[in-house]
Image (cartoon, rainbow, N blue to C red):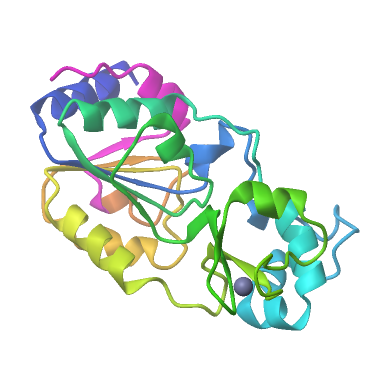
Amino acid sequence: MDGKLEQLQRWIDESRRIVFFGGAGVSTESGIPDFRSVDGLYNQSYDEPPETIISHSYFLREPEKFFRFYREKMLWPEAKPNAAHRKLAELEQAGKLDAVVTQNIDGLHQAAGSVKVWELHGSVHRNYCMECHQPYDLDFIVHSEGVPRCKVCGGIVKPDVVLYEEALDDRVVRGAVEAIAGADLLIVGGTSLAVYPAAGLINYYDGSRLVLVNKTPTPYDHRADLIVHAPIGQLFAQIEVRA
Ligand SMILES: [Zn+2]
């Protein structure tokens, strides 16, 4: 582990266009569980699996049940950034990191100070009326009851979160691809790389310094130039930011 930390530190020291690609594991150290871990066997309050509830057709069909699950399992307004979020923000401020690409919707990278963040699956902090497109913040969703309704027109307020059956935002995907393609160091953390489109995006990296940080092996381990099996926050806490 010590040798790997030193190698990662040396690569970070030498890089100017770092890109970090992160998944749910980045936020678990902030106390946010992966909503996919909701298990029907242990969770009697939901009849359907999360993938069904968090889908576009279910949202339209059963908005009451959707918002019950959404508020209970996907909103963590008290969560705070951890060492990984903070260190990535420092690297950006030091001019060493180009962008963060994330599968998370919690906004913790921005809360830590990161500016260039490509949110592949959207954000719980943005919500729009489906009729008049009036924007609403996270507080509005947290403090409304049942199906949140627009104060202007009464339309349903929908989170700007990519649901199952919905396409990713083209602009965001292009931004992520450009950042990854131009990276001199790509650090992938807290994702098993099993969920679309993570694996596909990694293929745009053209450099020779692909670092995978994950607690368990991923299908991409053979492609990595450095593999660290450790919690990402614990690892990043030990990294020093040197301009
Ligand atoms: Zn409206």
Magenta stretch in the rendered image: 223-243
Q: Residue at x 29, y 63 (%)?
A: 201
The foreground one among 141 and 181 is 141
Quadrant of the rendered image containing residue 159? bottom right
Q: Is residue 229 magenta?
A: yes
The C terminus sits in image quarter: top left
> In the image shown, does 152 or 84 lie closer to the viewer?
152
The answer to which of 112 and 40 lies nearer the viewer is 112
Q: Is residue 240 toward the left or the right of residue 157 in the image?
A: left
Whether residue 69 appears in magenta in the rendering, the answer is no
Q: Is residue 235 above or below residue 220?
A: above
Q: Who's the residue at 24% across and 52% down the image?
A: 223
90 left or right, relative to 191: left
Question: Split into 4 quadrants, where in the image is the N terminus?
Answer: top left
User: From this viewpoint, is residue 214 visible?
Assistant: no
Location of residue 169 in the rendering, given as x and y in whole percent from the top left corner: 38, 71
Q: Position of residue 211 (x, y in %)?
A: 26, 40
Res. 48 image quadrant: bottom right
* Residue located at (10% from left, 35% from top): 16
Give the image location of residue 134, x and y in percent: 55, 67
Q: Residue furthest right?
A: 44
| Residue 196 visible somewhere in the drawing | yes
Quarter residue 220 falls in:
bottom left
Q: Quadrant of ligand 1?
A: bottom right
Q: Position of residue 38 (x, y in %)?
A: 74, 54
Left or right: 43 with respect to 124? right
